[in-house]
Each structure stands twice: as C-alpha cells, then as structure tokens.
Image: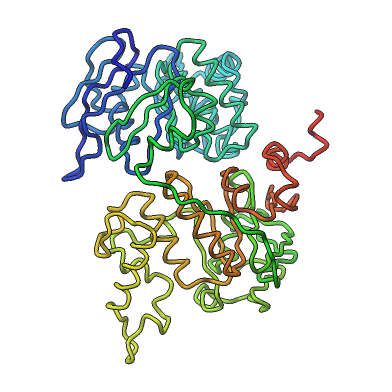
Amino acid sequence: MRGISMDALLDIKNVTMRFGSLVANDHVSLSCGYGSVISLLGENGAGKTTLMKVIYGLNKPESGEIYFEGKKVSVKSPKAAISLGIQMVHQHFMLVNHLTVAENIVMGNEPVKLGIFQRKAAANRVRELSEMYGLQIDPMQMVGKLSVGAKQRTEILKALYHGAKLLILDEPTAVLTPQETQELFKVIRRLKEDGKSVIIITHKLHETMEIADWVYVMRHGKMIGCVAKKDTSPEELTRMMVDHALEKFEKAACHPREVALSLSGLSYTNQDHAPVLRDVNLEIREGEIYGLAGIEGNGQQELVEVLSGIESRWTGTYRLLGQNVAGKSVRALIDLGLGCIHSDRHDRGLLLDLPAAKNVLLGYQHQRSVKTPVGLIDYRSVSQMARSIIEQYHVSPADETYIARSFSGGNQQKLIVGREFYRNPKVVIIAHPTRGVDIGVSEIIHQSILKLREAGSAILLITADFDELFKLSDRIGVIYEGHIVTEGKREEYTPNRLGLYMGGGTDEDKAV
C-alpha cells in the first residue's frame, strides 16, 4: 500500500469505527496529497461512506488519527471540518429550493453591510467563482428550477465559496448525462490545477480510470490497497474490490412476442396543475427489455406511479396483458401479473422496522399462496420464501428475522428484487435497480433481470446508468419533459446521442 506522505494534505492513520458489534472501519489508513484526485472503491458495506463521514465530522471514530496540512486535528462536526477546508457534496443535495443559487452558496457567510444582506455582492462573488472554475450557472436562478447537473454545480460552488481545500464527492455522476459528466471532470481537473484535492466515492470503474490519480480499495471495513491509476486496470480493481468470482452471464438474443404493456396518449397533470406526462406512447413486448433514459425529474417517477397503480389521475389508454386497466388498484395490477421496483427503496420498497420475512410479503399478503386453509397468513410458508430469496440473492446476514433497517443498502435492494421476481411477474417496472449498490450486487440483479426476460417477461427499465442501459436493453427510449422524444433499437444509440436527447436536443444539434 502507498505509504503515508509527510507533505500530504490529508493523512488518516489506523482509524477504527464501530457501530455496536459491527466494525465498519478496521484500522484504516489513507493519504491524499495536494492537488490530487483519489477514487475510493469498494462493495456495499465496505466502509467507504463511513470513512468519509469520519473525515467530515459526522462519525466519531473509536481510535486512529487524522492529520490535515501536517497538523493533528480533531474533526468533531461538519462545522469543524468546514473550518479546516474539508467539504463534502452528498449524493442527495443539501440545498434550499425556494432560495436563489447565490443565497444557497453564501449561506452561513453572507456579505452584509450595516447588517443588511448584500444580494448583488453575493451574486457577483458567485459569478466570479463560476467563471474561474468553469461552473456555468445563473446566480439569481431559483434552485428549485435547476436541473440535477446545475444543482451539483451549485453544491461545488458552495464548497469553494466556503474555502474548500479538500472536496469529497459521493457518487457525483449517478444522475448526470455523459456531457454533464465530462463537464464535471473538467471542473475537477481545474480544481486539481489550483492545488485543491478531490476524493470521489464511485462504483464506476471507467470513470475512475479517466479522472483519478490514485485508487484506494476497501473491502469488509479494511483498506485492501492503493494503486496509481497509471499502474492498474478495471480488471485488477474488480479483483481487489470483490473477494468472490463474478458469475458470467451471456445475454441471449431478443425474441419479442405479444405486446404485454401499451400506453397510448397517456398524460398526467400534478396537483399544481402542471403537465408532468405528455402524450406518452409506448409498447413493450413479452421477452424484451425497454430501457428508458432521461435526466431525473422529467416524469420518470410519475410514470412508475401511474403504471403501478399508485396514481390514478391520468388520461389516455393503459393496457396490461390485453386489459384496459383504467381505475384498477395496485392490488388488482399485481394480481394481473405486474411487478414493480421503485427507485426509493425506503419510501416504496420496505418497511424498515419489520424483519426480512415480513418485508418479502409486502404487496402479496392477500394472495392464496401465503394463506392457511382458514385464510390466515401462513408465516411458516413466508419464512421459507424469505430464506429462499436470501439464499438465491446472497443476502447478508442470511437471517429472515433480521430487521430491514439493519441491512446495508445493497442487501435491502436484493430483498426487494427477490420479492418482486419471486413470482415470475409477466410485466415488470424497474426503476434504478442498482443505484448505490456495488458491482457484485449489480451483477446479481442484472442476471435476475435477464433471466426474467428469457422467461418471457416484458420489462420496463428506468435507469440513469448508461452502462446498465446498454448492457440490458433491447430497445431504448428517452423521456424529456414528460414525453418520449426518441426510441429505437439499442444499437442505434451511443451515450452521446442519448445525452443530446436527454438535454432536449436532437441529432441536428451534434454539429452545433
């Protein structure tokens, strides 16, 4: 492993962090030089986020030392971290939607004169910073109206305004288009040129190979190793991350059959009377995967809620397995053969304070297969089903009585996928199935999706992960402002072409 540098910006030495009996960080050391970009890799539960929260003052370690700019420091809170020059941009942005970009950025250190907030001075300072680092944004725009990429730029500008010397980015490209990702990388390179350091938590190996100088890999709470990017490969990094062999799975040729899900002129207006879905036309056949790309906030969540029966205030035609399902409940759609994996596993996927066994029952507790002859829940059968899912999907810990909240994010997702796929649904709506999960979990989920396809299920895959989109999809569409603006066979598209459509452009914009 790379040795601790005497002139590093950040040195972490033998940090141990426990949560009860769980050792999340086990004598972990890490060094980050001035003007350096580090990628931190590891499977879910490896301890990456825990370690970053130690640096940022959100976790208090049991033992170990932190040195910043050569001095031993005690980082007891985010406020203490910020005062040192350590900033963290979380995957879920910490912005106030009803304030402007400038107001969000200067919050906590506002320019004032005679006790009055100087709005123009704040906007000018933000404009200077944005020009300096290539973070183009309107300081007077309301944050609530920004795209995801613009919100991320706001978070980075906020960190720079407050004096960031070390910037921690948590899964920074998870919801960006390819074009936005490249713009972010340009910004990171400028920060590096300016002597600032960046630590990126990511699951994307090709992005690590593009932007990092050094790569640290964690596994089971331990730091497995550190390698220079120039001396490694995605294959080597995968071997370091995963202590088990990844099963090879070949994707069979697509042989679509009958139309299983069709939408014609489907539109939806939200409670504020704003059109969210506009004249959506879509067909998905048995035995095919239709991948839907788009920047978040363009109607994907509402489409899932309509298709799953949660939202009933829509117009147009929705047919499922030949039946017009207008007005049908969630339960009725499940009974027809619909399965659904929502993007928010906590809000829609699990009851966090119940054990795994009861969570695999959710949505299906009315079906005869889990009832006794007198109509009561057959918990022996439910426990057997939970054990089967846990075994098939390698859920850890392998305990159906384990409370859902205590599982890692990846294991929670495996429980949800296992539950929805257990009954071999004829039509499946899948939103962001591998967001925030590691490469090992992703492979298990991808294999399960492809097996369903081979069994004849019709699958709508909504994802912001282009690797996932191109790996799994047979046909691809793009949703923009609630309307599907293009669709075709997977091989007709490239990431850049999709990115143009995701931003509201067309093929004609390529030359611009």
Q: Position of residue 323 (x, y in %)?
A: 66, 79
Q: Position of residue 476 (x, y in %)?
A: 69, 52
The residue most toward the bottom is 374
Nearer-the-camera pick, 319 or 289: 289
Q: In the image, is residue 393 above or below residue 202? A: below
Q: In the image, is residue 155 above or below residue 296? A: above
Residue at left offset 60%, top offset 43%: 466
Nearer-the-camera pick, 119 or 333: 333
Q: Position of residue 215 (x, y in %)?
A: 41, 26
Q: Position of residue 313 (x, y in %)?
A: 62, 67
* Residue 328: quadrant of the picture: bottom right
Left or right side of 38 for 463:
right
Residue at left offset 37%, top offset 67%: 360
Q: Is residue 373 visible?
A: yes
Q: Quadrant of the N terminus?
A: top left
Residue at left offset 43%, top offset 14%: 114
Q: Quadrant of the C terminus?
A: top right
What coloring was used for the rendering? rainbow
Residue at left offset 29%, top offset 72%: 383
The residue most toward the top is 7
Q: In the image, is residue 210 above or below residue 5? A: below
Q: In the image, is residue 261 above or below residue 192? A: below
Nearer-the-camera pick, 190 or 421: 421
Q: Is residue 116 visible?
A: no
Left or right side of 482 for 413:
left
Number of numbered discs on residues: 0
* Residue 416: quadrant of the picture: bottom left
